[in-house]
Amino acid sequence: MNNLNCGKIIKENPKVLSWNDDIQVMHYQTYQEIIKANMCVHMNMISIVLQGTKEILGCGMKRIVPAGSGFFMKKGSYLVSEKIEDKEKGYESIIIFFSDNWLQSQIDTIFDCKNNTQTQVEDCLSGDIALLEEDELMNSLIAQFKSYFNLNQDKERLQVLLPFKIRELFQVLISAPNGYHFEKRLRSLNHHQNQDLVTLMQNNYKENLSLEQYAFLANCSLSTFKRKFVQTFKTNPGKWIMQRRLEESYELLKNSEKNVTEIAYEVGFETPAHFIASFKQKYRNTPKQLQQQL
């Protein structure tokens, strides 16, 4: 059975441009047809087919992508075929790989170009795939990407410009007549990340963890974690954690017979003294005073 591992293909392909581990652009070409190969996609990807036809089977649905059009695919596992119409030209595509972290860092800029198309057509595409129909602006940008692989000079300048060109491509794809499919998939990635972060924090705010440890659990750098946190909760991690711990302690003081020390440790404070001082600052009473009033 054929297997396609994108990570391995990137390493073995000399025609790869990389800004960092979060963005990679590849000029992919093969002269051997591939039929229903297992494809492991390690990052989200956009692929524009230049020659041949791509067939994708995922979530029980088959998608056919002819030359001139493209597709967006979430990271995951798929069955793919690459059909060749002209043996001399083979199958050819430009592929952009991007991570969830990169999308999160660019989300505000990318969605400045919102697609306002109103449609009554049911969005029947798989949740993991969006077809990108042939578009003049898209193909013009892809031609630029292809030309970059032939440059022998100014490689460093190109590395700096690469993320700007990719953002431009995203905006072109979103603004296309049927770009709402693509926009919907991108927003679902962003929503999924935010939901994961909410779940992570709701399940772990009582734990005595550093921000670095929270970032590790969220599978991102500390700076990315802080940025995602503010975007999701509209406040910084320290303030949110303190607020949740104090709210939980208030409920425990009202509805349990536990003493102040037990509650302090249960909600995540390192010492009862820190708990008492923080509680009084928020509620104008010490925990003991609140218990006596109830």
Image: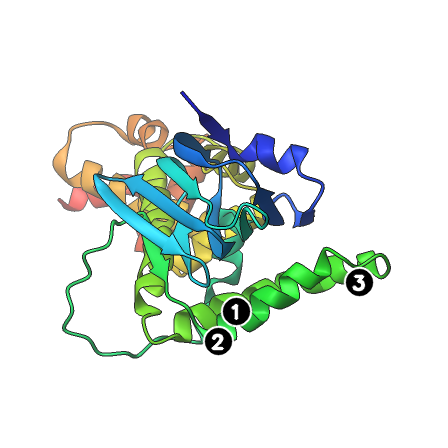
Mark 2 or 3: the one toward you: 2
Residue at (76%, 57%) from the top-left corner? 150
Q: Pointers 1 and 2 in contact (CB under 8 A)? A: yes
Residue matched to label 2: 136
Q: Quadrant where the N terminus lies?
A: top left
Q: Which mark is residue 242?
A: none
Residue 194: where, in percent of width, then height?
Answer: 36, 50
Please identify the quarter of the rendering in which residue 202 is found: top left
Which of 127/80 is in front? 80
Q: Relative to residue 51, is residue 257 drawn left or right? A: left
Nearest to N terminus: mark 2 or mark 3? 2
| Residue, far right | 153
Residue matched to label 3: 157
Instruction: Give the amino acid at mark 3.
Output: Arg
Residue 207: where, in percent of width, then height?
Answer: 40, 30
| Crowd around label 2: few <14 · some 14–19 · many ≥20 (10 Å) | few
Q: Relative to residue 204, is residue 219 drawn left or right? A: right
Q: Quadrant where the C terminus lies?
A: top left
Label 3, label 1: how far apart the Cα atoms are:
23 Å
| Crowd around label 3: few <14 · some 14–19 · many ≥20 (10 Å) | few
Which of 69/252 is in front? 69
